[in-house]
Image: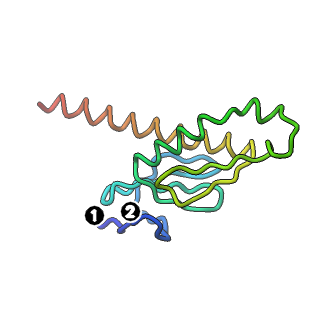
């Protein structure tokens, strides 16, 4: 199976050869096994990430205090800036977008962990 070559910072078209890991109405996360990269399609942009960077992004999004953001009346609390080392994208997200992004990243992480556990169980049965 020919998988497209995916490099960091490169404009990428989602193709049928990439595996969808998890999707919501707000976006989707795809996997490119050939380059060991995850593609995050969210907020109108597609970002290519190493797995470690994906995990850092998920942690950064999870660390945002949504309840404080919701009750704070200051204008600066209407948006949150999110960026992590290894990611070229700076996300400027509102409260509902952060909630959707958190759901997308959490679901993708769960699907990746579940897939890993299934492979370990199948490998143990073969041995």
Q: Is residue 47 left or right of residue 103?
A: left
Residue visible at 58% across and 51% down? 83
Q: Quadrant of residue 119?
A: top left
Q: Which residue is mark 2?
A: 17
Q: Is residue 122 above or below residue 89?
A: above
**Residue 61 position in % (x across, y down):** 60, 40
**Residue 71 position in % (x across, y down):** 83, 31
Q: Secondary structure at mark 1?
A: loop
Q: Quadrant of residue 15?
A: bottom left
**Residue 56 position in % (x across, y down):** 49, 43
Q: Is residue 109 above or below residue 17?
A: above
**Residue 108 position in % (x across, y down):** 49, 42
- Spot the residue most to the left: 127
Contact flag, marks 1 and 2 (Cβ < 8 Å): yes
How far apart are labels 1 and 2 at the CA level? Answer: 8 Å
Q: Secondary structure at mark 2?
A: loop
Residue visible at 60% across and 34% down? 63
């Amino acid at each position: 199976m020919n998988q497209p070559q995916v490099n960091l910072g490169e404009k990428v078209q989602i193709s049928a050869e990439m595996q969808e890991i998890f999707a919501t109405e707000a976006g989707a996360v795809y996997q490119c096994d050939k380059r060991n990269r995850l593609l995050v399609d969210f907020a109108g942009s597609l970002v290519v990430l190493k797995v470690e960077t994906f995990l850092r992004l998920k942690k950064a999004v999870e660390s945002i205090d949504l309840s404080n953001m919701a009750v704070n009346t200051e204008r600066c609390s209407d948006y949150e800036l999110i960026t992590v080392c290894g990611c070229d994208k700076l996300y400027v997200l509102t409260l509902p977008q952060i909630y959707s992004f958190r759901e997308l990243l959490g679901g993708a992480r769960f699907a990746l962990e579940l897939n890993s556990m299934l492979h370990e169980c199948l490998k143990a049965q073969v041995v």
